[in-house]
Image: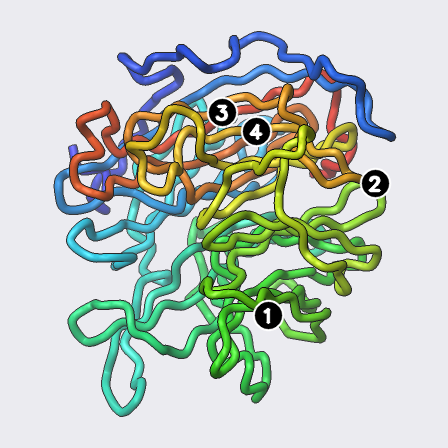
Amino acid sequence: MDHANPNSRRNFVRDSLIAGISLSGIAPLTLLADRLSAAPGQEILNFSLKLQVPTRLFDGEKCWVHPRAGIVPGAGKGELPRVVMTMNTLDLSGSDVFKGMYGMHSDDGGGNWTVPEALPPLAPRYEKVENEERPVAASDFWPALHRESKSLLGTGHTIVYTADWKVAHPRPRHTAYSVYDVRKNQWSKWEKLDMGNHRKFQNAGAGCVQRWDEADGNILLPIYFMPPGSNSQVTVTRCAYDGKKLRFLEQGNDLSIDDESRGLHEPSLTRFQGKYYLTIRNDNQGFVTQSEDGLQYAPIQSWKFDDGTDLGNYNTQQHWVTHSEGLYLVYTRRGAGNDHVFRHRAPLFMAKVHPDRLYVIRDTERILVPERGARLGNFGVTMISPDETWVTVSEWMQPEGAEKYGSDGSVYVAKIRWSQPNGLFSG
């Protein structure tokens, strides 16, 4: 069945691992312990892992990409939250061609999911760009609960295509955002964040970024932007949000790299034990930096293991899993018997980070989602409750032939179940 059919409304259950997936190489699905001495301020933290597949799509023409979820507290069954997931369809005949956004939700903790349905308010629309009507899509979307306003806010960026749906270069780009109405089970029509007439922000957006919401309701939203004549740079913006409108207030320092790469992309932000941490994509290697105030960041440094060797992540995003008792990085890397995978973007790993020395502790590395030939580099992280954090990802079925290793366009929900409540959660 093509789960992209918007007329299909039945519920279905996928509360188990896909038949035929080999779990060799995955840490046992029992309590896992960091066996090393904890970094300063971090206790030994255990977790278990459960892997589910609520849907899949691969028909030779398209597949699901960018599955990310947010929660609406109390909107599910009993006292459970409603978990709302959004995804783009990817046209396999092109590069980054996203012609539709779809959504589904679960009201029982992921046991049952609705069938993905098209989301017309988040669909591409036509705009006049350089005196030509062109399709513009909102993509790389990430829904996340804004607790101050008790609303589910999704952010991403726009992609301008040529008339025949090729990605345009250069192009204007904006941060796109939308708000979910739980009563109507509907997203608002996507809007663009107004960043003023700053020339350097004519090609700027928050695609695939992990934001941090401050206690006063303001939002620290990382973006990446391409000033004229330069490669891509990163900054963190502070935005006001009242439950309906997102407003740009200020930005921090610009982070850049002077080399032959395309620059810095897809920054993701978290806060742990009073400091802010930013992880950044680059063509050649992933980078990390930290800040005292969330806006001004130290010079970037490359991600490494605690033994001094390179992490092996490159040209792929990384995101944070943050618990009050531990800081973790989720990433892909070289050196895992995965040379056949595009840019080594599978399997999906998670490991503890030393928050002061900014390295990944190798002996804590675990596989969250197994490798089956398809890439897993575009994913999301969601705090579901004090006891659970989810990582959501799909098998991106390019290039052609990825399926010969067993992939089938599955969307995965990796449920991390903590042994201690996460003090950072307040739902």
Q: Which residue type carries mark 2?
A: Gln
Determine whether the residue tagged by mark 4 lies in a helix, strand or loop: strand
Q: Which residue is mark 2?
A: 273
Q: Secondary structure at mark 2?
A: loop
Q: Mark 3 near mark 4, Cβ–Cβ under 8 Å?
A: yes
Q: CA distance from mark 2 to mark 3?
A: 25 Å
User: Is disc 1 surrounded by few (<14), some (14 to 19) or many (20+) residues within 10 Å?
Assistant: some
Q: Which of labels 4 and 2 is toward the front? A: 4
Q: Amino acid at mark 3?
A: Leu
Asked whether the residues under the numbered discs 1 and 4 touch, taking CB atoms below 8 Å apart as contact, a structural biologist would say no
Q: Nearer the viewer, residue 264 or 83?
A: 264
Q: Is residue 171 left or right of residue 35?
A: left
**Residue at (50%, 41%) from the top-left corner?**
313
Q: Check contact, mark 2 vs mark 1: CB within 8 A.
A: no
Whichever of labels 2 and 1 marks the residue nearer the N terminus, that label is 1
Tell me if mark 4 has few (under 14), some (14-19) or many (20+) residues whose alpha carbon lies within 10 angstroms of its own: many
Residue at image mark 4: 350
**Is the C-beta separation of discs 4 and 2 under 8 Å?**
no
Q: Earlier in the sequence, mark 2 or mark 3?
A: 2
Residue holding disc 3:
368
Tell me the tag on residue 245.
Answer: 1
Task: Report how far apart the C-alphas of labels 1 and 3 lie in the structure.
Answer: 35 Å
Which comes before the other along the chain, label 1 or label 4?
1
